[in-house]
Amino acid sequence: MNTLVKDLEWTTTIYTEDTLFTTHLDDGGRITVLDRLTGWGHGLRDVETGYLDQNDEFWLASGNLDIRNHPGYTIEQAIDWIQDHANTCVGVKTNRKKQ
């Protein structure tokens, strides 16, 4: 996986006041970046970066952590960065349906 973060193709989905950026990886995993209003209100925003691997395990790094701020990282480095900074979900098994 020598592709760099800056070369990834991101799709954008806008939900009222939140924006989700998603890129699908060749191995079946995906990286997401969510820019959202926090549950604390008062217009506070957070950016979270998530990684879902091919085994349906999920890591989430929240606290204004945006992998797109590291354009020179390879996908492997990006995944390591997300996993190292994960503070909300750390290797949590999901129940996503196979496509």
Image (cartoon, rainbow, N blue to C red):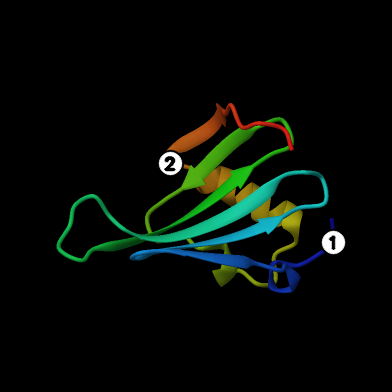
Give percent across and percent down for residue 50: 54, 49
What residue do we see at 65% from left, 48% from top? 80
Say which residue label 1 marks.
2
Q: Quadrant of residue 15?
A: bottom left
Location of residue 70 with respect to 56 vertically, above or below: below
Along the line of sight, the residue nearer the viewer: 36 or 13: 13
Image point (61%, 32%), residue name:
96
Occupied quadrant, residue 16: bottom left
Residue 29, image x, y percentages: 72, 44
Residue 82, label in figure: none
Answer with left or right where residue 92 lies relative to residue 97: left
Task: Return the x and y of residue 28 as percentages of the image width and height.
Answer: 77, 44
Of residue 29 and residue 4, the one placed in the foreground of this image is: 29
User: Quadrant location of the C terminus?
Assistant: top right
- Percent coordinates x, y for residue 9 in the rendering: 71, 69
Kind of residue at badge 1:
Asn
Q: Secondary structure at mark 2?
A: loop
Circle 2 crowding by C-alpha within 10 Å: few under 14, some 14–19, many from 20:
few
Q: Is residue 1 above or below residue 94?
A: below
Mark 1 or mark 2, which has the lower sequence index?
A: 1
Going by the numbered disc 2, the residue's amino acid type is Asn
Q: Is residue 57 left or right of residue 40?
A: right
Q: How many marks?
A: 2
Residue located at (50% from left, 48% from top) = 85
- Tell me the element at label 1: loop
Quadrant in the picture for the N terminus = bottom right
- The numbered dot on residue 87 is 2
The one nearer the camera, 4 or 26, is 26
Marks 1/2: CA–CA distance: 26 Å
